[in-house]
Structure formats: C-alpha cells, structure tokens
Image (cartoon, grey):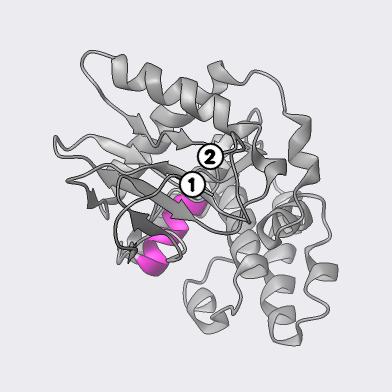
C-alpha cells in the first residue's frame, strides 16, 4: 500500500470518493493499466511548478511502497495544503485552455493504453463519438428519449452549412469541473486527471456543462454553445455525461434545452 500517515478524512469535489491521509490524497477506481499517465503527469507537474511566474499547477502522483502506481484499486497524489475549490467558470475555462496547451506539447501522439480502459466513462466516451450512443442507452429505458434527442441534434448539424469541426484531437482532461482547486496563492491546481483523446473544445464543453449542472454557473453560459462547432461539442458532452452518469438525472439535462 501507500506510505500514508494520519487519520483518513474525506475530501470534497470530483467524484466525492477521495480521502486525505497525511500528505497524500487517495482516490479509488484505478488500476495498473492507467499507470502510463503518471510519468506524464509527474513531468508536467514539476515543469509547471518550476515556471516563473506560476500560472497552472498539477497534482503530483505518488507511487505505492512496492513502486507500483496503484494498489488494490487506489492511486495517490501529493496533498496540497491551503487549497479551495474553484467554482468560477471563467477560471475553469482558462485552466482548460492552459492545461490542454501544455498537454498538446507533452503528448504529441495518442497513447495506445487508452484502448484498455473499460470503465463507464470510457465506454460512454466511445459510444458518444462512434455513433452508438442510442445502442448504449438501450439497456436503460429512461435514457432513450433524451439520448435519441441529443443524437438527432448531431445528425441535424450535418445537414447545415455551419462549421462543425471540433478541431484536432489530443490528450485532454475529461472531468475538469470539480477537479480544479486554487492554491494558497490563487493558482489553479488540477487534480484527479481523467484522460481522453478528444478535442479540447469537447473537453471544455464537458467542463461548462458540469459547471452549469453542478457548480451553479448560470444557464446563460450555454448560449455560446448553441450553434456551429460549439453546439456539436456540447451535444457530445451531454451525451457523454448522460451515458456515464449513474444514476442520471434526466430532467436536469432536459431542462437545459440543449437539442
């Protein structure tokens, strides 16, 4: 296991399943197939911390006692004292832009290890982007109408003259909202990295959608995501969340009128 000391205490934010133990943050739901991301994350975390002035920070992975990066489904990062959760949407979006710019340079080619993921978020991501969202929702009857409506919106986009290209795909953080803290100096500190190989526009759409749904960002924040490529990114973001949420609050998504 990890060389953790102190009393376990739950931490807010993200999926709500992380715990602090001394100077470590322990998060469940990981396995060694995800270990490939840790060296990338560690190198980038060090480089960002060495920047003068700092503009972005990233949680530093910590290996278990045996050198592995996971233990019994848990992973660890270094705890950062004095942080507060960021709920400000402009700051979240600026953080997304900065992080994805760094990741585009740090990881120029798609990691093959992404293909090994079979968690519900990875399954939802694939279904959202390969046109099988409606099939994926077949086993969950309460999702069928909403998923069908969102998928139909994507089909409608193809019949317009608007530019619907989401841009070049790269390594992105697919769960930023709720996983951005502000350190003691007010610098964004990104935790709980959720890797996906998608366009930064899609990842930003997921962030904006989550902020509206769960962080009390105004619904008006969705207005700029209702035409062209941003609309397409938002529809895919909504499909991704609807398919991966368990349980899914269908009424909450329907109230946004995304389609």
**How many numbered callouts?**
2
Vertical placement of 53 versus 200: above or below?
Answer: above
Give the x, y percent position of residue 231: 56, 51
User: Residue 179, position in %: x, y?
Assistant: 39, 50
Label 2 – label 1 distance at C-alpha: 5 Å
Q: Which residue is mark 1?
A: 2
Residue 164 at least partly seen: no
Which mark sits nearer the N-terminus, 2 or 1?
1
Instruction: Give the residue furthest to the bottom.
Output: 142
Extent of the magenta region: 206-214
Q: Position of residue 238 (x, y in %)?
A: 59, 62
**Horizontal relation, residue 77 to residue 144: left or right:** left
Give the residue drawn at x 48%, y 46%: 2
Q: Residues within 10 Å of mark 1 (few under 14, many from 20)?
A: many
User: Residue 244, image x and y in percent?
Assistant: 64, 66
Q: Residues within 10 Å of mark 2 (few under 14, many from 20)?
A: few
Residue labelled with disc 2: 65
């Amino acid at each position: 296991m990890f060389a953790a000391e102190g009393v376990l205490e739950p931490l807010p934010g993200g999926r709500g399943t992380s715990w602090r133990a001394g100077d470590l943050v322990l998060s469940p739901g990981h396995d060694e197939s995800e270990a490939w991301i840790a060296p990338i994350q560690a190198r980038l975390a060090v480089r960002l911390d060495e920047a003068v002035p700092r503009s972005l920070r990233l949680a530093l992975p910590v290996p278990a006692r045996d050198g592995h990066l996971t233990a019994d489904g848990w992973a660890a990062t270094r705890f950062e004292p004095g942080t507060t959760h960021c709920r400000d949407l402009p700051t979240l979006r600026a953080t997304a832009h900065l992080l994805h710019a760094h990741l585009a340079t740090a990881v120029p080619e798609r990691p093959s290890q992404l293909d090994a993921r079979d968690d519900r978020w990875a399954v939802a991501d694939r279904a959202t982007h390969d046109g099988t969202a409606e099939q994926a929702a077949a086993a969950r009857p309460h999702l069928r109408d909403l998923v069908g409506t969102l998928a139909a919106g994507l089909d409608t986009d193809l019949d317009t003259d608007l530019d619907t290209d989401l841009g070049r795909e790269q390594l992105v953080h697919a769960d930023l909202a709720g996983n951005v803290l502000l350190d003691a100096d007010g610098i964004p500190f990104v935790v709980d990295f959720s890797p996906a190989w998608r366009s930064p526009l899609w990842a930003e759409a997921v962030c904006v959608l989550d902020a509206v749904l769960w962080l009390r960002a105004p619904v008006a924040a969705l207005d700029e995501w209702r035409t062209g490529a941003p609309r397409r990114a938002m529809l895919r973001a909504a499909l991704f969340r609807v398919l991966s949420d368990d349980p899914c609050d269908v009424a909450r998504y329907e109230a946004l009128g995304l389609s």
